[in-house]
Image: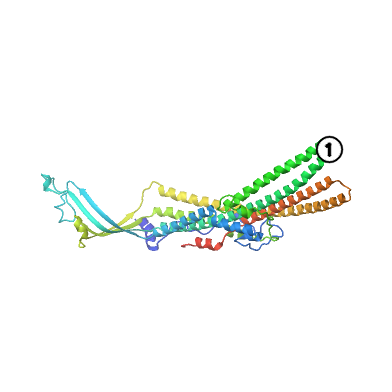
Amino acid sequence: MAKLSGLILPLLLGGCVVGPDYSGPPELGQAAPRPTFVRQPADASTSEPELAEWWTTLQDPVLDELERRTLVANPSIDVVQARLRQARGSVRQERANRLPTAGAQGAAIFADLPGIDLQASQGSTLPTPVPAPSSAQDADTSLRFYNLGLNANWEIDLAGGQVRKIEAANALAAAAAYNVADAKVQLSAEVAQTYTNLRDRQQRAAAFRGGLDLQRQQLALARQRFGQGTIPAFTVGQANRAVQATISDLAAADAEIEIYMNALAVLAGEAPGSLDPLLTPRRDIPIPPARVSIGDPSALMRRRPDIRAAERNLAATTSRIGVAEAARFPKISFMGILGIGGTSIGDLVDLGNISNIAVPQLQWGLLDFGRTSAAIAQARSGRDEAEAQYRQVVLGALEDAETSLARFAQQRRNVAAFAEIKRSADEAATLMRQRYARQVISRGDTLEADRQQRLAEANLHSAVAALTASYVAIQKSLGLGWTEAGSQASALMSK
């Protein structure tokens, strides 16, 4: 008895909340981030980047419009927003579960109780058994009771299990809010990447068309010279194969243009083809700013919504341990009924026939054959899983950032190299035209120099597109593209 009192008395006096209190994300040990990014470019800025609308740094109004439409109308945003509303509803539901419930009720009871003379027991508190009557008319064993009134139920949160449920629901609502933010991060990066690919294919198609015109001139010249007997037939065949290869490349580029335009329309929540008037006019590939702000790894962990969602999931699983542990302790509940009624329907309108019932109830599962212990072990394992997932998300985020920074630095070097190739091709084409004007070389040599110039230009455009794509990857890895205010409000809701 003394042991039972030692368990129950603190709960009654202090309103104890069982289970571990959440003390924040775990220590990462070897997975802890360094003070700065290991792969950051030498000219990168450690200042904090802008959290929202990072794509405006690319200075492309069409891209800005696409991002605006996507973040408003994409169905995946609606999906995560609906999940957020569900999580918020769970918070309100769990908070309401701490309060009493009340309602109206009407009851009609019909019973036949053999062996009990209800007429003989009217003057006593309870019906008393009587000897079996000699005939059915000697005793009345039937009961009729009518009642109309109010009922109320209330379960006291003795061990704090409901408090833990509210904590878990709040944490899951915050995680849902960060999932909304993460969806915006993913979508904004996908739109920018797809748009960059579209502009790259448009530039490539234009280069193919220009090169095809030069190749057809080369083919015509080869046929003319073959007719004059100055070149062999295989030279004509070689020129014709080059024309057909470029036609094939052009067809592939045109098909990819249509694919990317369809993808952008769907991302914006519209039917394929609806954005063609906006996207068909060819524009230059957007170019990243000269200096990129990346902050530091610690700021990345505070900023990336997927990390913050994983941390909130960890908090929720910690609270669920308390929910499971609360099942070890007694439950006290109260039920009350207040109404009017009697043994006939007419008693329902007689205000003098007031009946009231109060039913306090104590429940304590003393013997459950290990069910509660198993539930607690399961909850603790769920917390361990959430902690491991948190560490995994952190490591994945750091890897994303370091990889995107390394690729960005590499693509900058590639752009510089292709720019030099383009400069050399321009000089060579100019020199060949001058030599052709002095009749030092043939027209075919000039056409080939012009074709090489266009090819160098196309390769430079592709290198710029790869640079922009790596810049987009940096913004995605840093967790940019959402607003802090709305998610903070969700995270702090009803705390």
Is residue 147 in sight in this rendering?
Answer: yes
Where residue 344 sits in the image (x, y, percent)? 19, 55
Where residue 290 sits in the image (x, y, percent)? 71, 60
Q: Nearer the viewer, residue 72 or 80?
A: 72
Left or right: where does residue 463 sit relative to residue 350? right
Q: Quadrant of residue 34?
A: bottom right
User: How many residues crowd mark 1 within 10 Å: few (<14), some (14–19), many (20+)?
Assistant: few
Where residue 286 sits in the image (x, y, percent)? 68, 57
Identify the residue at horizontal 83%, vertical 38% (top origin): 227
Is residue 479 in sight in this rendering?
Answer: no
Left or right: where does residue 94 sit relative to residue 425? left
Q: Nearer the viewer, residue 261 or 193?
A: 261
Where residue 100 sits in the image (x, y, percent)? 35, 60
Identify the residue at horizontal 68%, vertical 46% (top origin): 253
Q: Nearer the viewer, residue 71 or 208?
A: 208
The colour mode here is rainbow
Identify the residue at horizontal 53%, vertical 52% (top origin): 76
Q: For the N terminus, which image quadrant?
A: bottom left
Left or right: where does residue 318 sit relative to residue 265? left
Labels in figure, total: 1
Question: Of all residues shown, which one is farthest toward the top?
Answer: 233
Q: Which residue is mark 1?
A: 227
- The disc labelled 1 sits on which kind of residue? Gly
Label 1 element class: helix
